[in-house]
Image (spheres, rainbow, N blue to C red):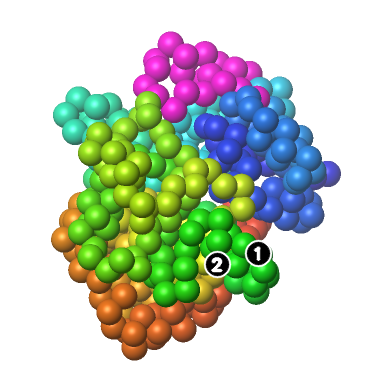
Amino acid sequence: MKTKLIRLTTVPLSLKVLLKGQHQFMSSKGFEVIGVSSKGPELDEVKEAEGINVVSIEMSRKITPIADLKSLWQTYRFFKKEKPQIVHTHTPKAGIVGMLAAKLAGVPIRLHTVAGLPLMEATGTKRKILDGVEKLTYASATNVYPNSQGLYDFIIQNKYTSKEKLKVIGNGSSNGIDTFYFSKDKISIDVQEDLKKELNIILNDFVFIFVGRLVGDKGINELVSAFSKLTNPNAKLLLVVPLETDLDPLHLETLQEIESNPRIISVGFQKDVRPYFAIANALVFPSYREGFPNVVMQAGAMGLPSIVSDINGCNEIIVEGQNGSIIPVKNTKAILEAMQKMMDDEFYYTTLKSNARPMIQSRYEQSVVWKALLEEYKFLLEG
């Protein structure tokens, strides 16, 4: 009989993107996998692409006590009906709802992966509430997996749970990276040239790229401010991002600069980011907080060096002076200097670029991460 494994995320995009391929892999290894998330078209896409059953239970990303209690009750009833051996949650809201419901429903193996903590930027009462939620999530779980060493240390420092419950799987990351898929070789020269023409990128341009959400805590205000001070006319900034206006919106002057600066190219959300990486020279990712950022691994696999902020995850993927540059958080001047150095120092840039892909392949290849998680599941089931 197959072992029933339920994977839970707050929104279906996380189930689809953050854990892509993993559901199918676990199914092939003898698990009956069920994906649970809020409703949305991506949920059906997961069902189709991964060949697993999916169930929608509404969960809010915000602090909504009444709605959260409703989510908890529905999740509890679902677990009582399905009787899974393992429930594995990702993202903060799915974590508290899923772990609490699984404990109440008597699920024996309750796992939560920590892939970033929004509370790092919270203060006052909101921080206290989020601290309490985190502690309750970990107390309800049997095992907690920070997806980076930095998150592991942060959890210990803040006394959210004991060391006995914590473990970093492999070298970190929730899903690793498919370096066969994320490879510049997969994007033809014709596709690259057409895209450059479309975006008005010429031969001597040096293209800095940012991929992610267009919000304050991704460091966009500082990035745009720094870029606007670059005097080299061949510098371009390519933003491959969906704009978010409800959570953590950008400063008005940042939005105006993006709109008015002809050297800033904003292309919105793109289903396939590889062509954009293929025509870029370096990633700039000055985020305030991350778990283990896929974007930095993707850029590296595509052969790009990265400028990243000195935060957990980023400062593990990037090694200073080897495959990129690590700069202080929220520091416009440091971003400007790092971009300037990449453009001006050809030997430095070429060295970082030549190391970028091999350093990702050797540490974060997807199959390695999946096998490490499979071994963990087997170990817990035998115990």
Q: Which mark is residue 278?
A: 2
* 269 displayed left or right of 231: right
Of the residues under marks 2 and 1, which one precedes in the sequence? Answer: 1
Task: Report helix, strand or loop for mark 2.
Answer: helix
Q: Which residue is mark 1?
A: 191
**For the point 30% across and 71% down, which residue is it?**
325
Viewer-proximal residue among 25 and 266: 266
Specify whether residue 61 is painted magenta.
yes
Viewer-proximal residue among 101 and 121: 121
Is 365 situated above or below 68?
Answer: below
**For the point 44% across and 28% down, which residue is it?**
61
Residue span colored magenta = 56-77
Q: Position of residue 5 (x, y in %)?
A: 68, 41
Viewer-proximal residue among 275 and 55: 275
Labels 2 & 1 near each other (Cβ < 8 A): yes
Is 218 situated above or below 135?
Answer: below
Task: Report helix, strand or loop for mark 1.
Answer: helix
* 314 displayed left or right of 379: left
